[in-house]
Image: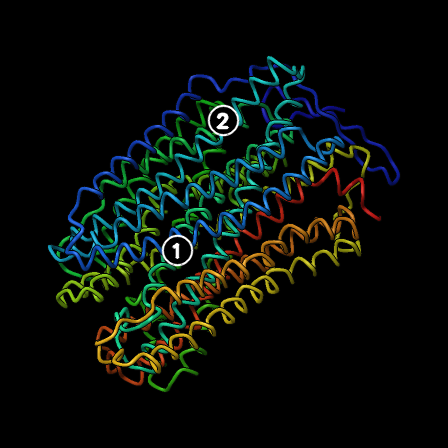
Amino acid sequence: MTRQFGHDKLILQLDLKGGSEGTRYRLSRVSEPMDFGPLSYLIPVSAVASLATAGYLSSLIGSKDPGNAKMQSISEAIKEGAYAYLRRQYKGVVFFFVAMFAVLLVLASAGHVSFFTPFAFLSGGFFSGLAGYIGMVTATKANARTAQAAAKSLNDGLRLAFSSGSVMGLTVVGLSMVHLCLWYFGLTWYYSAIDAIADNTTMLNTITSVMLTSGMGASSMALFARVGGGIFTKAADVGADLVGKVEQGIPEDDPRNPAVIADNVGDNVGDVAGMGADLYESYVGSIIATSALGASMGMGVRWVSLPFVLAAAGVLCSIVGSFMVRTGERAQQSLLLAALRRGVNTSSILMVILSWFLVRGILGPQYTGIFWAVISGLAAGVAIGRVTEYYTSADYQPTQLVARAAITGPATVIISGTAVGMMSTALPIVIVGVAVIASYYLAGGAASELNGLYGIAISAVGMLSTLGITLATDAYGPVADNAGGVAEMAGMPPHVRERTDALDSLGNTTAATGKGFAIGSAGLTALALIAAYRDQISIVAPDMNLAVSLMNPAVLVGLFIGGMLPFVFSAMTMQAVGRAAEKIVEEVRRQFKEIPGLMEGKAKPDYASCVGLCTAAAQREMVPPALLAIVAPIVVGVLLGVEGVAGLLVGTVVTGFLLAVMMANAGGTWDNAKKYIESGKYGGKGSTAHKAGVVGDTVGDPYKDTAGPSLNILIKLISMVSIVFASAIVSFSIF
């Protein structure tokens, strides 16, 4: 019997057989052009426009006043520390990428993967690292300039810090478009002109499989960047806070604190470079996953091309929105947040309008449901952002209650913040669940499972479609934080620090919102990747009957292992932060004890020793968690077979999503609760409540900036590894 799925050129033939063989299928297709059509030009245009705008903003930042000699000296020290760390990190990561390249080359020679696969893995890592590096260069250039701009006006400070964030956001999406263009159009030309593949379905499967490996490379680099940078920044932050603010009673970013430069360096290597690499892989991963799903299901070039074109449209919308952010002189959270929302909302509205025409233009008016699937993802992202804002902003009750709990000490702060983090998981789960069901049925899932699964995947693209400006609202926060540090260390007037603190507090909320987008998209993308894994198994082993059922012991065991992995991964990263922080605490205590006149401000601390300790610890500690994500699906595949891997993927998504949301929001709540107290509530700075708030913030730091944001990478990386190694798992599985 035959039944039509997808669009009018796809014929899916079902061969119904009794017995244990179950239902088998094969795909056939009327040939259609591999070219995207006129809309394909939107992709390179968006790449050029994005990178050109980022270049313009970067030059604009460079033209601003860098402040006095002392400010420039502090900024230079931060930049040198950040550069030194990244150079060492990239040198260390090279060995991992060379080893993985060798493994993939062996698999390619054995026919398990394409010849291009090893090179795609390297390119993904390169572009992910490059995105983070460019963002960090811009951030270190902007910190002192933002402090100087804030001395003039709050709006000038916001505009400059946001411009720095915009460079990061636009660089990430611009490089993503360049990377995807190179592989898609390059491989299309190769397989059309050099090594011809007659069947377009096979060609698309080959191309998207290679591109998935580039996504795996990007995810690998992002994991190293997030984990390593997170360990660095939180070790420095914990050491600076516990000894400086709690034990010695000196202000945050006080130049007498030996860990203060390391703390500011950490903001750049963790919250900028690490975050840039993280969001790069999230963005690329959602696009590639959707395209790969469309290809593996035999849905044709139009369905494969749609995520690329929608992403390109989102880039242009983000550029327009980035110029809409400005504010007055009142340092109220609500007003500052409204300024950022203006840019995000403008981009989102434009994206809705463009998506309507693009979906109907590429797929045809009969597939308007795909448009609504895109919108469901975009709406889910906005909704998750609002929920995150509610649980992490000091303008709302949850954070205020955590601050109030500080009156009775650190224990109640930690209890209250943990409870807020746990409670904050409920609404994001509901939102993602609604988005999954809505996108499935809106895309036509009731009539065709293929269309429904594609709808879920395209909703993730919709959620991240305006990443250019969403990331800008996230990346500007570390710049504002650094600006406050520069202002404090340079002895600028109190009103400057007041303005940078307002921008920094807003940055904590927007950073948590950005993490919410990344985590939400990870959940949706992972579902698409699980479907792509199933279809990849069907391609490499067409006679295999994949029995994914809870009654299958391999699936059940894999499910338990997958559910456990996020907890083990988080434990490894947090223990790494703890071990590194211990060394920093000891070093800071030593300097306060042994350097005469340090507390009196008559002697200069040894900043370099703390930077060196953080760097060494981060490089040493980042490897085991990253290897866990690579090794786990391969080992489970060998021991439990393809069904065990399917269980592993599901378990990782469920617990990873919940744990990531809980950690990100709890950490953001503790941070802003501390700042709420510092604004004058419950005794203000130096009070007993403030010291308790600092302890809560210290606990929350590795939650929100190390373990939490790394989990969304873990979820997708495990899925991508499973797909890339699917053929090897089938061949070498014990069962």
Q: Return the residue at label 1.
A: 271
- When asked about the image quadrant of residue 356, the answer is top left
Q: Residues within 10 Å of mark 1 (few under 14, many from 20)?
A: many
Q: Is residue 296 left or right of residue 509?
A: right
Identify the residue shown where x is 65% and y is 56%. Answer: 651
Position of 556 relative to 255 (above/below): above
From where the camera sits, is residue 724 visible? Answer: yes
The residue pinned by badge 2 equals 182
- Asked if 512 appears above or below 210 in the picture, the reply is below
Tell me the crowding category of disc 2: few under 14, some 14 to 19, or many 20 or more residues within 10 angstroms, Cα based: few
The picture places residue 337, in percent across and down from the top left corner, at 26, 55
Q: Is residue 348 left or right of residue 203?
A: left
Asked whether 316 or 460 is in front, the reply is: 316
**Which amino acid, by three-letter code, is at mark 2?**
Leu
Q: Element under label 2?
A: helix
Q: Position of residue 120 (x, y in %)?
A: 57, 33
Q: Residue at x 58, y 65 (%)?
A: 572
User: x%, y% of residue 722?
Assistant: 67, 44
Between discs 2 and 1, the one toward the N terminus:
2
- State the residue in front, 712 or 363: 712
What is the three-letter code of the residue carrying label 1?
A: Asp
The numbered mark at residue 464 is none
Q: Is residue 333 above or below residue 475?
A: below
Q: Quadrant of residue 402?
A: bottom left
In the visual, does 305 lie left or right of 563? left
